[in-house]
Amino acid sequence: MADNTPLKSLPAWQALEAHYEKVSKLHLRGLFAADPARGEKLALEAAGIYFDYSKHRVTEETIGLLADLAESAGLREKIEDMFTGEKINVTEGRAVLHTALRAPKNATIVVDGENVVPHVHAVLEKMAGFAEKVRGEHWKGYTGKPIRNIVNIGIGGSDLGPVMAYEALKSYSHRGLTFRFVSNVDGTDFAEAVTDLDPAETLFIVASKTFTTQETMTNAETARDWALKALKDKAAIAKHFVAVSTNAARVSEFGIDTENMFGFWDWVGGRYSMFSAIGLSTMIAIGPKHFQEMLDGAHEMDEHYRTAPFERNLPALMGLLGIWYNNFFNAQAIAVLPYEQYLKRFPAYLQQMTMESNGKRVTTDGRDVDYQTSQIYWGEPGTNGQHSFYQLIHQGTKLIPCDFIAFAKTRHKLGRHHDLLMANVFAQAEALAFGKTAAELKAEGVKDWLIPHKTFEGNRPSTTMLLDELTPAALGRLVALYEHSVFTQGMIWQIGPFDQWGVELGKVLAGRIAPELEAAAEPELNHDSSTNALIRRYRQHRH
Ligand code: F6P
């Protein structure tokens, strides 16, 4: 396909439009009744993930047509371009190589004439050396006490990945160490994170790709003041602060010795960086061996994505199913529902990965799109969501495809808990798909006037992903699955998933407003009348 062929003019797109007219009228009840083997036929297993997509409003023909769309959108070539270091982040002129972060030592991936893989492994080794020192109490604080608390200061990709991975793999973590994550510029975040910590036992990891992010730098400066207030000597910084960044100059300007800096590269996007040095807190928590297992899991998914035919390719299929609902059924959202308490931050992590990537309204060559792009991703762990927003998913007016994520084994065998948890996830997918008809309710003796309220129309789609156990490798596979699903969608929508210009305007305006709030004398305000009034009111009321 020529890159600038408008998406909706592709014959494969038009075939899907025509196909939608037929399939949208089908009910999952009918589809399952017509084919007793459907539940096994429309399921795949790859890289340790059993992926049941039978409860989607698709036929085998739909999957074929979606795969045709991926082919005619040039997805195959685009995957190769990404994996081989082409500068596919067009507006920033960068390669996109988070896959290189988990490539084996003997791989060769060339960017600007240089194989980046040895650099990746050199940083991993440096991280491992440091992580072992902290874990083994060999890295001492300024007063000679061992480090017991690790505080990661970062925001966006420099926070969400680390906190998600720490929470997900807590059962593998070093229990003698306390981990905290500070992201918000709201001082409460920092204050509460350190309230019970001893500065002499606390290590700050300042994680920022650019080392210019206002929130992170403000928190880092506050952390430096907090540490120096207790430790009293600037020399203490070297023992209590390390940095993860691509910007060595800014790191040393801040006062952190670049010896204590863990680098990465401009070809790692912030929201794709949890496998880079940004994962330093994760590595300290779970140890280098488990960190490597996580990388290996992600690499396994990378290889699957790169090689499997699209009909049998989990990330491609996941992305294409998203397009099917987003662009043909006009569904606006996807609920991510992990039935695993350890994945409680996974939906928040995915929100940045998906929406900062594909929340775009122009194509890479600058045309307005005339179709919807990224869905809204949201979710909570099961079963909590069931007692909260699931009502809307079951009986509301919106179509919300769901991603259920569950594990056959629990990390905590406690009585009936896990069987009950799993009973719930299977039940939810079943209820959404098949619902409950008026006839069934009548047969149960439900009074006529109550029947409309108790009817579940069903036909509400979901994927159920069943994995063996939440191991570091499983987490790596899951993250890579979503990363590549996002890529699949971005390529088909012809947008650039790897920049984020949409976050800039707010940053610039905040930079303009901050001095107006801080000025001693009443500032002259030249905003709109609403913003002016809010600023004036805040200045009057803040004390
Ligand atoms: O403002 C958005 C963003 O640029 C994200 O893309 C990024 O993950 C986050 O800010 C943090 O950036 P940094 O790691 O450079 O501090």
Image (cartoon, rainbow, N blue to C red):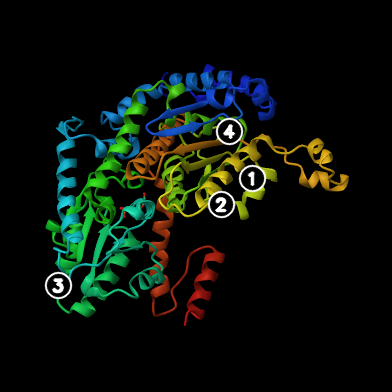
Q: Secondary structure at mark 1?
A: helix
Q: Would you name the residue on which mark 1 appears? A: 393
Crowding at label 1, few (<14), some or many (≥20) Cα neighbours within 10 Å? some
Q: Secondary structure at mark 4?
A: helix
Amino acid type, mark 3: Tyr
Q: Are marks 1 and 3 in contact (CB under 8 Å)?
A: no
Q: Would you name the residue on which mark 2 appears? A: 383
Q: Residue furthest front?
A: 415
User: Which residue is painted at 52% across and 34% down in the image?
Assistant: 322
Q: Secondary structure at mark 2?
A: loop
On the image, the x and y values in percent for residue 91 come to 34, 38
131 is higher (above) or lower (below) than 489: below
Task: Identify the image quadrant of residue 201.
Answer: bottom left
The answer for how far apart the CA atoms under marks 4 and 3 are is 56 Å
Crowding at label 3, few (<14), some or many (≥20) Cα neighbours within 10 Å? many
Task: Identify the image quadrant of residue 462.
Answer: top right
Crowding at label 4, few (<14), some or many (≥20) Cα neighbours within 10 Å? many
The answer for how far apart the CA atoms under marks 3 and 2 are is 45 Å
- Horizontal arrangement in the rendering, residue 245 relative to residue 271 (left or right): left
Q: Are marks 1 and 4 in contact (CB under 8 Å)?
A: no
Q: Nearer the viewer, mark 4 or mark 3?
A: 3
User: Which residue is painted at 62% across and 37% down in the image?
Assistant: 430
Q: Would you name the residue on which mark 3 appears? A: 142
Q: Nearer the viewer, mark 1 or mark 2?
A: 2
Amino acid type, mark 1: Ile
On the image, the x and y values in percent for residue 475 come to 37, 43
Q: Is residue 96 visible?
A: no
Amino acid type, mark 2: Thr
User: Which residue is painted at 33% across and 47% down in the image?
Assistant: 270
Q: Would you name the residue on which mark 4 appears? A: 325
- Between discs 4 and 2, the one toward the N terminus: 4
